[in-house]
Image (cartoon, grey):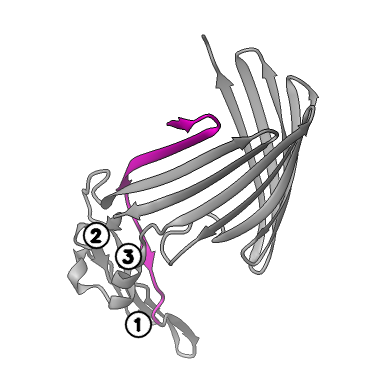
């Protein structure tokens, strides 16, 4: 909604559905050579057999944001999941002990479904903690030179829970239009425990748009190559 010239605010409401979650923990599986034996202890929590799509959990969320335009500058701020009630329904999950014992004289396996009330606390605590926490994003764009766009952004997620990307990121990016229909981009970002660099390009031919992007993440326990491609078709 436009508040006044150059200032806009927005609110987004959303409804989350949890289709399914699988949690497992190794509680001491081991193997021995003399005597030969394999002892598996891997309890699991997963959707009940025959459960319907969307039975795993649900909740509502609320995002708010604002944008200010001042000449060649544009500033934006967003608070995502300012309110979010999503949680998994532990009662909609089934517990499977996941135990097995094999030796040279016998074998025994227990993978039968039971009530989640019988599951070890180490599993139910993970499910109960898999919520969606709030995050704040700030950004700025400068377009003081023809065909050039410079951007900067900062993002921070708070609390534990479901993780969609790094908890923290701060970066800069640049876009240069080789032609009005062919912008190319590059970025560098500091993220939680590492860095990310990448780039991309778009091809805009009337109502048809093609966009590709790639990135490389490196750091503590991070070694990823990212890629994305999109096709859009707009008809007026």
Residue 111, by quadrant, is bottom left
- In the rendered structure, are the residues bearing label 1 and label 2 in contact, judged by CB atoms less than 8 Å apart? no
What residue is disc 1 on?
105
> Which labelled disc corresponds to residue 93?
2
Which secondary structure is most common in the magenta stretch? strand
User: How many C-alpha atoms fall within 10 Å of the one at disc 1: few (<14), some, or many (≥20)?
Assistant: few
Q: Which one is earlier in the sequence, the residue at label 1 or at label 3?
A: 1
Q: Residue at x 70, y 23 (%)?
A: 203
Q: CA distance from mark 1 to mark 2?
A: 35 Å
- In the rendered structure, are the residues bearing label 2 and label 3 in contact, judged by CB atoms less than 8 Å apart? yes
Q: Position of residue 120 (x, y in %)?
A: 27, 76
Q: Secondary structure at mark 2?
A: strand
What residue is disc 3 on?
127
Nearest the camera: 93 or 139? 139
Q: Nearer the viewer, mark 1 or mark 2?
A: 2
Q: Nearer the viewer, mark 2 or mark 3?
A: 3
User: How many C-alpha atoms fall within 10 Å of the one at disc 2: few (<14), some, or many (≥20)?
Assistant: many
Q: Secondary structure at mark 3?
A: helix
33 sits left or right of 58 in the view: right
User: How many C-alpha atoms fall within 10 Å of the one at disc 3: few (<14), some, or many (≥20)?
Assistant: many
Q: Which one is earlier in the sequence, the residue at label 1 or at label 2?
A: 2
Q: Is residue 26 above or below residue 33?
A: above
């Amino acid at each position: 909604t436009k508040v006044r010239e150059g200032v806009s605010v927005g609110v987004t409401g959303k409804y989350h559905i949890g289709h399914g979650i699988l949690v497992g923990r190794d509680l001491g599986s081991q193997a021995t050579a003399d005597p030969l034996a394999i002892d598996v202890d891997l309890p699991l929590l997963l959707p009940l057999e025959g459960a319907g799509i969307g039975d795993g959990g649900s909740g509502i969320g609320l995002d708010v944001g604002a944008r200010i335009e001042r000449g060649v500058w544009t500033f934006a701020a967003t608070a995502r999941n300012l309110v979010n009630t999503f949680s998994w329904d532990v009662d909609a999950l089934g517990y499977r002990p996941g135990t097995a014992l094999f030796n040279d004289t016998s074998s025994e396996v227990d993978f039968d479904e039971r009530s989640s009330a019988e599951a070890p606390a180490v599993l139910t605590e993970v499910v109960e903690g898999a919520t969606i926490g709030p995050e704040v994003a700030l950004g700025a764009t400068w377009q003081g030179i023809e065909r050039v766009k410079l951007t900067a952004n900062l993002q921070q997620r708070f609390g534990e829970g479901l993780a969609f990307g790094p908890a923290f990121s701060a970066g800069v990016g640049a876009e240069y239009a080789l032609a009005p229909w062919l912008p190319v981009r590059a970025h560098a970002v500091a993220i939680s425990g590492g860095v990310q660099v990448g780039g991309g390009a778009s091809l805009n031919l009337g109502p048809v748009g093609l966009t590709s992007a790639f990135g490389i993440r490196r750091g503590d326990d991070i070694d990823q190559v990212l890629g994305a491609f999109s096709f859009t078709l707009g008809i007026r």
